[in-house]
Image: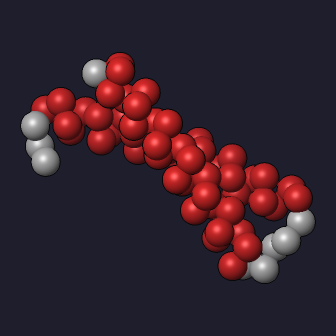
Amino acid sequence: MQRLFMLLLTIAMGTMAGIGVIVVLVLGHVGLWPILIGAGTGAILAVPVSWMIARRMIAGEG
């Protein structure tokens, strides 16, 4: 499960960090710190999301 989690995490972290940056830019914040905070928030949120997806894939629920 740990290998699957790490694989999913690498994909999800980049994706969700990018989503965080896009959300910040759409809201009109174009400074360095808002963009970094958006990217960091997305990357941090990727950890539980990856864990839940890996757990469901191992359990065979989808």
The answer to whether one can see residue 42 in this image is no
Name the residue: 46% across, 36% down: 9
In the image, residue 46 lies at what x, y percent?
Answer: 50, 44
The answer to whether one can see residue 50 in this image is yes
Q: Is residue 58 above or below residue 32?
A: above
Q: Is residue 26 above or below residue 39?
A: below
Specify how the rendered protein is coloured: secondary structure
For this view, does 7 lie left or right of residue 25? Answer: left
Q: How many marks?
A: 0
For this view, does 12 lie left or right of residue 32? Answer: left
In the image, residue 50 lies at what x, y percent?
Answer: 39, 39
Name the residue: 73% across, 73% down: 25
Quarter of the N terminus within the rendering: top left
Residue that lies at the very extreme toward the left in this rendered image:
60
Name the residue: 49% across, 36% down: 10
Q: Is residue 47 above or below residue 29?
A: above
In the image, residue 22 lies at what x, y percent?
Answer: 65, 69
In the image, residue 30 lies at what x, y percent?
Answer: 85, 71
